[in-house]
Each structure stands twice: as C-alpha cells, then as structure tokens.
Image (cartoon, helix red, strand yellow):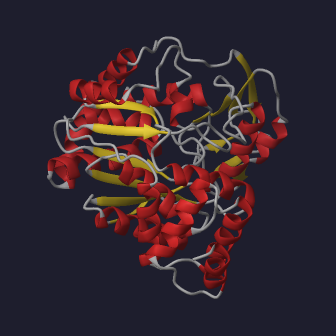
Amino acid sequence: MNIVEIINKKKNNEVLSNEEINYVINGFMNGEIKDYQMSSLLMTICFNGMNMEEIYFLVDAMVKSGNVINLSSINGIKVDKHSTGGIGDKTTLIVGPLVASCGVPFVKMSGRGLGYTGGTIDKLEAISGFRTNLSEEEFVRQINEINLSIISQTENIAPADKKIYALRDVTGTTNSIPLIASSIMSKKIASGADKIVLDVKYGIGALVKDKEAAIELAKIMVKIGNRYNKKTIAILSNMDNPLGNMIGNGLEVKEAIDILSYRGNKELKELCLVLAAYMVSLSKNIDYKEARDMVVNNLINGKALNKFKDMILKQGGNIDNIKISNNIIEVKSNKNGYINGINALSIGKLVMNLGAGRLSKEQGINHGVGIELVKNVGDNVKVGDVIARVYYENKTIDLNDVIESFKIEDNLVNKEYIVLGVIQ
C-alpha cells in the first residue's frame, strides 16, 4: 500500500478498506505519512464523504491509536455526554450534577476550547484552585464517592484524532460530517462510559449550520455508539442564538450555579433537563417521564446544586472565588421593538476579541471577560433599555457591534424551541 494510491482511490470516490484506513492512521502517527499527504486525503474526504463502513473503520483505527479507559471499578451504569458546541454552551456544568444527584455515575473527560469561547475545562479553571488533572485513580474514587467528576482528557485518548484534528483545523477540513462523527465518537468510545447522550447543535453559532446536516451527523454518531454496544441517544438543539444569558468562562460558571439554584434562563434550563433526563433514563433503565421527574425534583430541592458544590470542593476549588472582571460597560438599545434574534456567531466573535477564546491550544485565555445578555429573544425593549453588559480587562470592543447583534423589530416573530428532536 502507499498513500498516493489511497488518495487517488478516495479522489475517485471509491470505498477504502479497513486495511487501507489502518495503514493511513498508523502511517500518520509514526511519521511515514506526511502532513501534506494527510491533508490531501482529508480534503478528498470532505468532497466525497465516506460510507458507514469506512466511518466504522476510521473510528476503530483512532480508538486503537491510544488507550481505552477501563471504568469497570466504578459502580453502576456509567453515562457520558457530548455537545457539538456553540456560543454559551455550559450544559456539562449543569447536567453532570443533575445526573449525579439521581445516583447515576457521570463520567466526563473534557477538553479546552478552540474558538470563540473556552471549553468545559476552561470554564472550570475560572474557579480558583479547581484541579482538572486528576489521576485515573482519583477520578474513579471520586465517581464512586459522589457520582461526579469532570477532568481534562488524558493525552493518550484517541491520540490519532488529536493529531488529525490539529491538521483539519488549519487546512479547512473541519466541516466534514464523517470526520466530525469519527472524531467525537472515537473519544467517547475510548473514554469508557456505558451509555452516551449527544447534544447535536445546528445554527449560525454551531459547527454545523444546516439542520439536515445536523440530523445526518446525529444519526451517524448514534449508529457508531450502538455498534460498540453503548446505547446512544442524540438530542437536536438550536444554536442560532447564544445558549443562556452568559458568554465567557467565569460568567458561564456563575450562570450554571444560577440554573442549579432553580433560577436563570428558561431555554438553557429546559435543554439541561432534557439531556439529564435521558441520561438517567438510560442508566436506570426507566422511562423518560419518570427520569425527568427525578431530575426536576433534584433541581428544585437543591440536591443537584449540592452535588456541584461537592465536586468543586473535592477537586480543590473555591466556589466563592470565580474569576469575573469588575470592569463592566452597559450596552443600551437604540430602538424600540421586540428582540427576534441574537446573532450567536457575532456575539461569539466579540467575546473572542475580549480574550475569552483561543485560536491555538498554546494560547492563554482570560477567564474573567465576556458578555451578559440582559434581554432575551422575545423580550420587548425601548430606547435606552440595557440589553447587555460587557465584562472586559485588557481589551475592549465596539459597543455598536454588540447592539447590531440584536435583531430588534416592530413585531414579535415566533421562534423555534431550543430542543428540536430526539434521535435514537
């Protein structure tokens, strides 16, 4: 076999064999296949796609490139979740405690974010002292004690995916459904959970912009999970508007605490309840309604909030010391009307410009900056009403750009619900 023949085969829209895909992954990892050759193959996959068999082969090869974590010493049916990401997505911080409060082991290894805002680990590191680099032994012990731990991904979980993703990120090959699906699911399979719930987002602020493409991605990932005998469910959700009111690392931790205190943004709360209920349903083998009742009760009675506090304490964090800037500018509406949309992509770029995101993994981020949306989609506003607050430190932004992110019109237009469907 040689890489040029494989590139030409995929360029001609032919199906790659298991042996060919393994040859590519192994060759790329050992340096035999060069970056420019892998880039060429990735681009042909972007244009010509892959069938399910090829996707299965690719996931297998990436899983086998590193360690598969054995979580058999954790009691109970272990559940994991993954979100395809978006602006203001802090669902893991809320869903984890909700699920754990119902007696279900929530096992989550997360990464740092590349893009407009930080990832789950970046958000947690906005909490003073919080440790994300627990050993596998500490991770297992904490799950057995409180059913909840969120840690940074170990280096040897699907290392082929990490190396390929770094190349995709700089070669314009990120938006391929087979490559997205195999990237996400190789890490989920290697992370050792028994059941998986996926939050697949679409819209202007998501990786996948088109609803039909998001449905295709969800179906493929569900098939992959089920093939590995890990029951997988996907929830389709909207990302045209930012998720919740806070965008920025420390601000999003504060909002997670608000939601766990049974306050805050209704759409964010509803999405988290749906995700948590499906996770509890899978783990306990009970119907969705019974699981949802448990989750809602534990949100109302404070058990979920206490789980979050337990996790913070056990991982060395101080929940009373969250990095949030004291420099705040209020942004006021320049027109009367109804808010019919808040451009998630625009808000994400503004938060990135404040310093809350990163373009490379080596780049530092500012945990304290971000934007708070004071008014939500559907609200009526008048000239002079405060619609947002900007939290800044070293960098500032043009407030007119914030105002222009709000779509304010004379009449209220019906908007799509946050949860748009379930695929299983």
Does 14 sit above or below residue 404? below
Q: How many dots with numbers? A: 0
Q: Residue at x 51, y 71 (%)?
A: 21
Q: Is residue 144 left or right of residue 178?
A: left
Q: Can residue 95 be spotted in the picture? A: no
Q: Foreground residue, 88 or 128?
A: 128
Q: Foreground residue, 334 or 134?
A: 134
Q: Is residue 3 left or right of residue 100?
A: right
Q: Is residue 246 left or right of residue 303?
A: right
Q: Locate the N terminus by quadrant.
A: bottom right
Quarter where residue 172 is shown: bottom right
Q: Locate the C terminus by quadrant.
A: bottom left
Residue 60 position within the rendered picture, expressed as x and y whole percent measured from the top left: 41, 63
Does 136 sit above or below residue 344? above
Q: Foreground residue, 398 or 230?
A: 230
Does 135 sit above or below residue 174? above
Q: Residue at x 73, y 48 (%)?
A: 346
Residue 416 position within the rendered picture, expressed as x and y whole percent measured from the top left: 51, 60
Q: Is residue 282 left or right of residue 423?
A: left
Q: Can residue 407 be spotted in the picture? A: yes
Residue 246 position within the rendered picture, expressed as x and y whole percent measured from the top left: 58, 34
Q: Residue at x 84, y 40 (%)?
A: 400
Residue 190 position within the rendered picture, expressed as x and y whole percent measured from the top left: 38, 50
